[in-house]
Amino acid sequence: MALIACGCSSPYDDITPEFKQNPQPKQRYQLTLTIANAPGPFASVQGFMQFDVDTPECLPPPNANGGHLWPTPTETIPFAWTRVSDTEYTGVVYIDGMVDEDYYGRGLCRWKMMQARAALKATGAARETRFVPNIYSDKLAAQQAESTYLLKADYPRHPEAASEDPVNYGLTDRTKMAHLQDSELFVVTLTPKLAAP
């Protein structure tokens, strides 16, 4: 009643606060993307970073969401790839891409960079397969390369694909594709290197 009487607002009234990107990130990494044994060219190469709130205790309690646990806030920040050659691109990503802040009035929400992804398409046209290799933040921080194995038959689009927007995430474990010959696959490798701030 006090809230109504004074015209005050609850910190949970705005269930979708405006999350802030860090305008001056310092923990930067250069990513090199290399393509081996490709079935054809990739005219469209995009980049995305995914950040999740890593401190669930800063989120509103379940009773502020109809008794359900509050969904983990996720933000996606695009980044650009620079073409070096038909088989190599470079881009810059950063771990500290979001601003840690008390967004809900329950304490500091800390963001964690979950992964960096590439999205490759043959020409960029609709209905083509989107090939999406990624690298998780632990490998990024350790400056360890990550290779993703992808099916050539899905390029530019698998003839039996039912989806309007087919996506192929590939696999990083080659042994899980042991039934396939190397000639049936191509490989995208993401190699991180600490960059100057």
Image: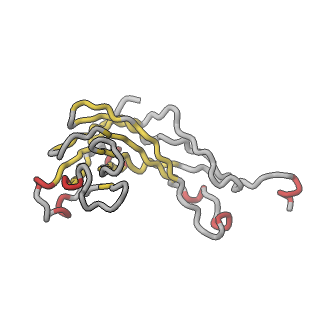
Which residue is nearer to you in this view: 97 or 91? 91
In the image, farthest residue toward the bottom: 67
- Seen at 67% across and 67% down, the residue is 63
Q: Is residue 130 above or below residue 21?
A: below
- Seen at 23% across and 50% down, the residue is 155
Q: Is residue 56 above or below residue 47?
A: below
Which quarter of the image is occupied by the N terminus?
bottom right
Provide residue 39's location: percent of width, then percent of height. Answer: 17, 46
- Seen at 81% across and 52% down, the residue is 8
Which residue is nearer to you in this view: 34 or 59? 34
Examine the rendering and report whether any part of residue 132 can be seen.
no
In the image, farthest residue toward the right: 5
Which quarter of the image is occupied by the C terminus?
top left
Examine the rendering and report whether any part of residue 101 can be seen.
yes
Q: How many marks?
A: 0
Which residue is nearer to you in this view: 186 or 20? 186
Provide residue 174's location: percent of width, then percent of height. Answer: 18, 58
Provide residue 50's location: percent of width, then percent of height. Answer: 44, 48
- Seen at 45% across and 33% down, the residue is 26
Q: Quadrant of residue 173?
A: bottom left
